Image (cartoon, rainbow, N blue to C red):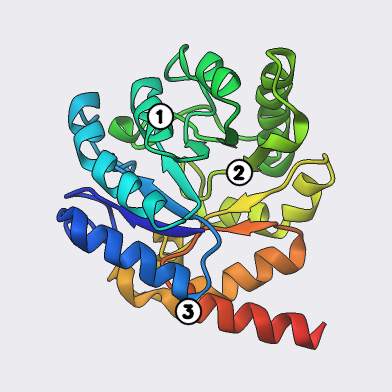
Amino acid sequence: MAIVNVTPDSFSDGGDRLDPVQAIDDGLRFVSEGADIVDVGGESTRPGALPTPPEEEMRRIRPVVEGLVRQGVLVSIDTRRASVAEAALDEGARIVNDVSALRDDAAMLPLVVRRDADLVLMHRRGLPENTFAGPAYDNVVEDVLEFLLERAALCETAGMMRDRIALDPGIGFGKGVAQELDLIAGAGRLAAAGYPVLIGCSRKSFIGKLTGIAKASDRDPASIWLAVEAVRRGASIVRVHDVAGTRQALAVSEAMR
């Protein structure tokens, strides 16, 4: 899953793709480099970020989704708002990637069921504006898994098929460095629940804390290694900035196995 943020303030690439033409070109390049899915987001969820008005989020994502879908790209919409998700689905997106696991907008679940979309449920503690503050974890892998299974069960009760749901433990969303590593190492435990697991650790701040690399875009080597490790541990999908590098590393890892 390739990341295409059309925001002015995302932690790594904010402002790089405010021009829809540039965002579409980058999305097509990622597909040529080996991306299966292009994830388009119009609201930053970095710690400290303030909410983006839905109308502005919709304005940012709509032309990009439409342009990529017209070129045959499988598009995911990264949003926690039903109105934005519906606009993207109207333009041909097929996956809703909700960082709130459907908690921030009560209209999201009925929409996803009605439109027969695929869904990514992500664990998040707190909100971006309060830097993801919340209760401590007893066992981060088990606590996150319990939460995600409860959300998945809610979706299935509403009529979603199990094979349309993926789980994302939410690397970087209210966890400490050791907990981030535990969740990547625990991808197999999450996958054992019977849902595909998505790991999105690309360029995250915990990599900077481990390596001393302050600039997010300089963290690709470690990000690639972690993507390979996540797949080796049981992840089905990795959400990345460096598609070409990750594809190369995954190919060699597979050959070694």
Sequence order check, earlier mark of 2 and 1: 1
Residue beneath disc 1: 85
Number of residues whose C-alpha sits closer than 10 Å to that of mark 1, classed few (under 14), some (14–19) or many (20 or more) = many
Of circles 2 and 1, the one toward us is: 1
| Separation of marks 2 and 3 at Cα, in angstroms | 24 Å
Do the numbered discs 2 and 3 sit on residues whose CB atoms are within 8 Å?
Answer: no
Q: Nearer the viewer, residue 42 or 210?
A: 42
Number of residues whose C-alpha sits closer than 10 Å to that of mark 2, classed few (under 14), some (14–19) or many (20 or more) = many
Residue beneath disc 3: 244
Number of residues whose C-alpha sits closer than 10 Å to that of mark 3, classed few (under 14), some (14–19) or many (20 or more) = some
Q: Circle 2 — which element? A: loop
Of circles 2 and 3, the one toward us is: 3
Q: Residue at x 43, y 51 (%)?
A: 39
Q: Quadrant of residue 43?
A: top left
Q: Quadrant of residue 4?
A: bottom left
Q: Residue at x 33, y 77 (%)?
A: 218
Q: Residue at x 29, y 43 (%)?
A: 44
Q: In the shown orientation, is residue 235 left or right of residue 132? A: right
**In the image, what residue type sits under mark 1?**
Ala
Q: Position of residue 230 (x, y in %)?
A: 66, 64
Of the 4 image quadrants, the one containing the C terminus is: bottom right
Residue beneath disc 2: 169
Q: In the shown orientation, is residue 13 left or right of residue 228? A: left
Sequence order check, earlier mark of 1 and 3: 1
Asked if 154 appears above or below 61 in the picture, the reply is above
